[in-house]
Image (cartoon, grey):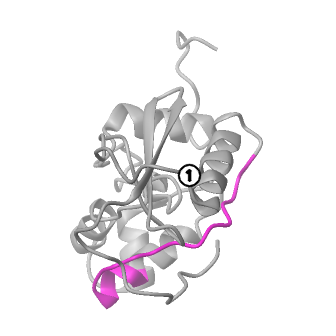
Amino acid sequence: MKKASPGKPLELFGPMHVGVLKSPIGKVYVESDGERVVRVSFTHLGQGKRGKQPKVLKEAMLQLDGYFKGRRKKFDLPLYQVGSEYRKKVWHRLSSIAYGKALTYEQLSENVGGNARSAGTACGDNPLLILVPCHRVLGKSGLLTGYAGELWRKKWLLQHEGVIEKDLFDEA
């Protein structure tokens, strides 16, 4: 994962470039300022800027599509992450959780400081779903808890990555 480039500051209230990717877990909306990926969400992000999509947005869409098709396990994109030092520390640690692996919120907090609840809150504030894999963090006993994209998507992502087994009656 490329580190966020300092570049120019994000235009907070200006329209962003928005791409939409159809995935097995619904539409994925990717937002870019033209130089970096700013947000990935399952919630419609609005119209966005009209015109040609920037190269970084096209690349993000290609990489996410590869992930959903099982051909990509890591992302290499410039990201724009705004948050407190603690949140950035949590997000950085999330980015180092390998595909097919998971941590508990308690283990995450042991790595970054704070407690499981504060680590969980920082995960919930992650604006870059999938790219910064907060779905790879589980409750203390391996329970699926908390995910901004809804728990059924977290379950699908973890099954897709082989962290948890597919249910016996799930479609292939």
The reply to whether the magenta stretch includes residue 78 is: yes
Expressed as whole percent of the image width and height from the top left, the position of residue 104 reads 42, 61
Query: In the rendered structure, which segment of residues is drawn in magenta?
Result: 72-89
Q: Amino acid at mark 1?
A: Lys
* Residue nearer the viewer, 81 or 8: 8
Expressed as whole percent of the image width and height from the top left, the position of residue 164 reads 55, 37
Q: Would you say 47 lies left or right of 25 here?
A: left
Q: Would you say 130 lies left or right of 86 here?
A: right
Expressed as whole percent of the image width and height from the top left, the position of residue 122 reads 29, 70
How many marks can you see? 1
Residue at 53% x, 58% y is: 131
Extreme residue in the right direction: 71
- Which residue is labeled 1 in the image? 52
In this view, 42 is above or below 4: above
In this view, 33 is above or below 101: below
Q: Is residue 100 visible?
A: no
Residue at 35% x, 56% y is: 140
Quarter of the view holding residue 77: bottom right
Residue at 58% x, 81% y is: 3
Q: Is residue 111 visible?
A: yes
Q: Quadrant of the N terminus?
A: bottom right
The reply to whether the magenta stretch includes residue 31 is: no
Q: Quadrant of the C terminus?
A: top right
Q: Would you say 92 lies left or right of 58 here?
A: left
Residue at 39% x, 54% y is: 49
Expressed as whole percent of the image width and height from the top left, the position of residue 61 reads 60, 47
Magenta stretch prevailing secondary structure? loop
Badge 1: residue crowd in 10 Å (few <14, some 14–19, many ≥20): few
* Residue nearer the viewer, 61 or 83: 61
Name the secondary structure under disc 1.
loop
Q: Would you say 55 lies left or right of 90 here?
A: right
